[in-house]
Image (tube, rainbow, N blue to C red):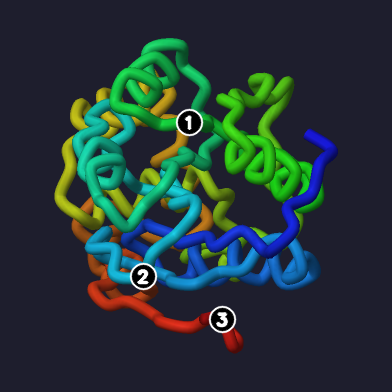
Amino acid sequence: MTSTAAAPIRVALVDDYDVVLMGVARMFDRYRNRVLVVEIDANQSLHDAADIVLYDSFAQPESDHDEIAVLVDNPRARQVVVYTWNFHPDLIESARRMGARGYLSKTLAARDLVAALEAVHAGEVVVSEPPRRARTAIGLDWPGRGEGLSDREAEILALITQGKTNAEVAALTFLSPNTIKSYIRATYRKIGVDSRTQAVLWGVAHGFMPDHHRIDHWRGGP
């Protein structure tokens, strides 16, 4: 993963949350000679031609990869790469079966993420090593970060705000119901609420509902 492309790789970013995608886009700014963000899409309806679509898994239905299949079938997308920190073997197998050419960890440093995308662009299939411990790459962002929520706590709160039950959240994230309960208790303490209803209201007021628009031409992209 050391080769560089002759021209910047055109990358489209896909997720339902603008704040998440803007953080990823900022990570790439130092590498604009190698990776150029051509579109930030909060609806998955890719408009610009892209060498790689980077599908961020934040608060997405990780156990249902229909979204990946839709992106793979999009003629404007040359390759599709999943960007996540959930490395359950079934999720990796599902993404590969749907046609994803990369399954990359959010713990990758920006330079390593860029190198991995270059490898995918060159024709390789790249699957990151599972992270040894939970940590987040510098530069990423998510709703609730300013209030002290970890990315996983924020993701679970986002799913709750979308109306998911604990059982559904557990199934979607490949975590146990007890683990989900632990995350929820920790989240409630951090945001100062005592009930699910209060948590949902807090989530709606603090950007935990999905966004529904797209951003063209990130900082002068084509």
Q: Is the residue marked by circle 1 packed among few (<14), some (14-19), or many (20+) residues within 10 Å? A: many
Q: Residue at x 32, y 57 (%)?
A: 76
Q: Is the residue marked by circle 2 packed among few (<14), some (14-19), or many (20+) residues within 10 Å? A: some
Snapshot quadrant of residue 220: bottom right
x and y percent of residue 111 in the render? 81, 50
Q: How far is disc 2 from disc 3 in space, using C-alphas?
A: 11 Å
* Amino acid type, residue under disc 2 in the picture: Asp
* Amino acid type, residue under disc 1 in the picture: Arg
Q: Is residue 179 above or below residue 204?
A: above
Q: Earlier in the sequence, mark 2 or mark 3?
A: 2
In the image, which disc is placed on residue 139? Answer: none
Give the residue at mark 2.
48
Q: Earlier in the sequence, mark 1 or mark 2?
A: 2
In the image, which disc is placed on residue 221? Answer: 3
Horizontally, residue 54 falls left or right of residue 130, namely left
Q: Residue at x 58, y 32 (%)?
A: 123
Horizontally, residue 91 falls left or right of residue 136, namely left
23 or 110: which is nearer to us?
Answer: 110
Q: Is residue 89 above or below residue 58?
A: above
Helix, strand or loop status at disc 1: loop
x and y percent of residue 130 in the render? 64, 20
Q: Residue at x 63, y 44 (%)?
A: 117
Give the residue at mark 1.
101
State the quadrant of the N terminus: top right
Q: How far is disc 1 from disc 3 in space, using C-alphas?
A: 24 Å
* Amino acid type, residue under disc 3 in the picture: Gly
Horizontally, residue 9 falls left or right of residue 11, namely right
Helix, strand or loop status at disc 2: loop
